[in-house]
Image (cartoon, helix red, strand yellow):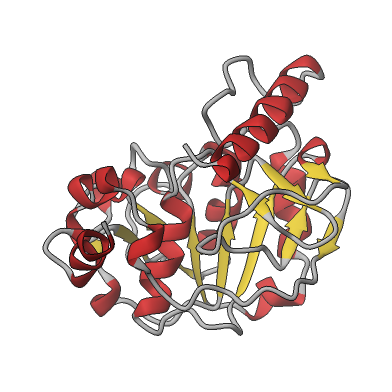
Amino acid sequence: MTSIDHAKQSVRRRVWDLLEREGAAPTGVHGHIPDFTGKEDAAARLAALDVWKQARVIKCNPDRAQLPVRVRALQEGKLLYMAVPRLATPKPFYLLDPTVLTAPFEAAATSTGAPDIAPTVGPDDMRPVDLIVCGSVAVSRPDGVRVGKGAGYSDLEIALLAEAGLVTEGTAIATTIHQIQLLDEELPHASHDFNVDLAITPTEVLTCTTNRNRPAGITGRGLRQDQLDSIPILRGTRWQDARHNRQ
């Protein structure tokens, strides 16, 4: 692990401990995107924003914390892309179209329900994304730096879509979190990490400002060998070659 990795893990442990101690997330939250108390209220605050109202295509992570966001998107007739957990299929996103779904939205928008009813799609099959909603463990109030659970999938998902031109500098990125997860300090970050534009808690909407440019796509430097080996869409690609060439 690099020094940045160690610093991120320290932040994660501190936030996970605090969430459990305060009863703001279920016991056993370590290692996960926190399923925080008040997630429905945070989703409602997000849905009241113009950036949400204007979005027709939304990409969201599959974690429980963002389930109210996904259900609301479908209820409002928005096209929803949800990442396949661990990007484990050759086409790594579920397509959830509320106009054709036959199952209840509350079931369809889960990682256990989607595989039975939603087709998977890759970037070549997808429409440009108007709004990304991601899960987070911690977010820095000063600049919107986000720390995830450490697996790196959210960064890869956005990088894949950016590589395909489906996500640009103008695509808003939001996260819903508990107030405890919003930290006043600067947080560690790597060059391939993305910042969020909006951090929404059950009681607050924070618009973040940053001087960092958003990664425009996947770089070999940001990939781990285990990711290249386990994520089908990355196998046998120029990213694999790029990583080997720098070793």
- Residue at the spot x=80%, y=45% of the render? 182
Classify 6 as above or below 225: above
Furthest-left residue in view? 236
Along the horizontal axis of the image, is 28 left or right of 52? left
Q: How far across and down, in percent of the image, does residue 99 sit? A: 39, 69
Q: Is residue 184 visible?
A: yes
**Which one is nearer the viewer's eye here, 44 or 245?**
245
Q: Is residue 206 above or below residue 17?
A: below
Q: Quadrant of the C terminus?
A: bottom left
Q: Where is residue 241 shown, x and y percent of the image?
A: 18, 66
Depth check: 159 or 246 in front? 246
Q: Position of residue 82 (x, y in %)?
A: 41, 56
Which residue is found at the position 67% from the left and 63% from the top?
196
Front residue of 103 and 56: 56
Q: Is residue 29 above or below residue 41?
A: above
Q: Quadrant of residue 242?
A: bottom left
Work out whether residue 208 or residue 131 is closer to the camera in this orientation and state it.
208
**Quadrant location of residue 79?**
bottom left
- x 71%, y 68%: residue: 197
Residue 81 visible to the viewer: no
Q: Is residue 125 left or right of residue 127?
A: left
Give the percent coordinates (x, y) of residue 141.
Answer: 83, 54
Classify residue 71 as left or right of residue 200. Answer: left
